[in-house]
Image (spheres, grey):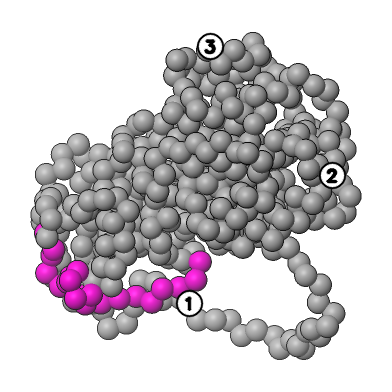
Amino acid sequence: MNFNDFKFHPQVRAGVTAAGYLTPTPIQLQAIPRVMQGGDVIGLAQTGTGKTAAFVLPMLHRLLAGKHSHVRSLIIAPTRELAEQINESIIELGKETGIHSLSIYGGVNAKPQVAKLRQGVDIVVACPGRLLDHLNQGNLDLSHLETLVLDEADHMFDMGFLPDIRRIIKYVPKKRQTLLFSATMPDSIKGLAQEVLQDPATIQVDTAAPARTVSHSLYPVEPHLKTAMLLELLQLTKTESVLVFTRTKYRAKRLGEKLAKSGYRAASLQGNLSQNKRQAALNGFRDGSFQILVATDIAARGIDVSLISHVINYDIPDTTNAYIHRIGRTGRAAKSGAAYTLVSGEDRIMIRAIERVLGSPLERRTVDGFDYSPAPPRKNTEFARPPRQPQPRRKPARQSQTKPVHTNPQGDQAKSSTRSGKTGKNNPGRSGLRHGRGATPPGVNLQTGRGGGQKRGGR
Ligand code: AMP
């Protein structure tokens, strides 16, 4: 089956050609006909499977059949990055259709969003908090909505957005098409699906397992040697773009700076800085000006950069879901990728959990020639925070006056640290890497959980 068999409107077919898609992915094969007919769908699919086009293409096809005077499709996504990315897909795939879309999220001025809404848009891609603000202020009329998409529903639940989603649903007509996409189906999402979908078709593609095109390896190392190990791996491995994950915003920022100091074109995606800086880091990573992006889970959600050859977990994630999502950043749309995870004794429970999800043990690797012997420093200087500045004393707020505020819990922003010059140290030989189960370097005991440790911090 190819894209001609869907019998898309020629203007939609033109978008497929422009995007360079030749054959539909499995989720597209299953979802597109159902969505084109107007039916509800539960799509159990991880990112990287082509799920965005699976709902965007039939949505564009259906929109071309009606009048362009109202918001007729609403896509709700958990993060600004994902909302922005979906909107970019709509713009790319809908280039020839004349259909207008708008992304709406917090952390940026609301006025331009209001102005664009007044001009008229057919599709809104939104994060829940800012969308509710607009709805409450009467900036947006959803009474003509035809299709509602809830993307990455499990993440929306993780981020505490389900109450907002239920509030938003009160603004949309009961008679509508609803599509819900989620990588996993916890009970909370099953409950939501029962409330909001009618007679849905469930389509499942590689749920709860990373793309098969990704290889996984663990690099046991003491926590204080992680940066040295990361530099060694970057030195020994031939990579394209590399996405590095840390547990906290601060670690992402510091590691990004360290990599830049070591001569890599590296940026970090974290912090509470402006949306502009966040976008600059992402754009730089996308267009290759930054070869390495160091990010936290929340900041990196939804990142779609086709040339990510390696995802490196500098810190193992807290949940197996987070592992799957991190790894979903590489090996996208059938390209192959590699996932490296630096692990120490304290990570053994999470390693076992990930191995259970993957259904097989993860390969342990040691790096020949790497000096595993240095003892931990007495004090953690690497990620020690600078001393706090004294804060002016403030009067305590009067609680009864506080109004509920919609905050975006992912308020993670980019602070990029760059350095021009070196283009990454690519070395085609991987001669320094040794593979095999049980290859654990001195000082790291993955059985007993000893091996030093750094405190987990909040994102
Ligand atoms: P998604 O899972 O929607 O985040 O898509 C992952 C990546 O696959 C994006 O870069 C898409 O542009 C790309 N993609 C989607 N559908 C296809 C297709 N049929 N052929 C090739 N690439 C695709």
In whole angstroms, how far apart are the C-alphas of marks 1 and 2?
45 Å
Tell which tag, 2 or 3, sits nearer the viewer: 3
Describe the element under mark 2 as helix, strand or loop: loop
Describe the element under mark 3 as helix, strand or loop: helix
Reading the image, the residue beneath label 3 is 4
Provide residue 179's location: percent of width, then percent of height. 62, 39
Res. 85 visible in picture:
no
Q: Quick one: 362 or 261, which is closer to the camera?
A: 362
Q: Which residues are magenta?
A: 439-459
In the displayed structure, 226 sits above or below 66; it is below
- Mark found first going from the N terminus, 1 or 2: 2
In whole angstroms, how far apart are the C-alphas of marks 3 and 1?
59 Å
Reading the image, the residue beneath label 2 is 140
In the displayed structure, 36 sits above or below 433; it is above
Provide residue 362's location: percent of width, then percent of height. 22, 53
Q: On the rendered image, what quadrant is the N terminus found in?
A: top left
Residue at 52% over, 38% down: 202
The secondary structure that dominates the magenta segment is: loop
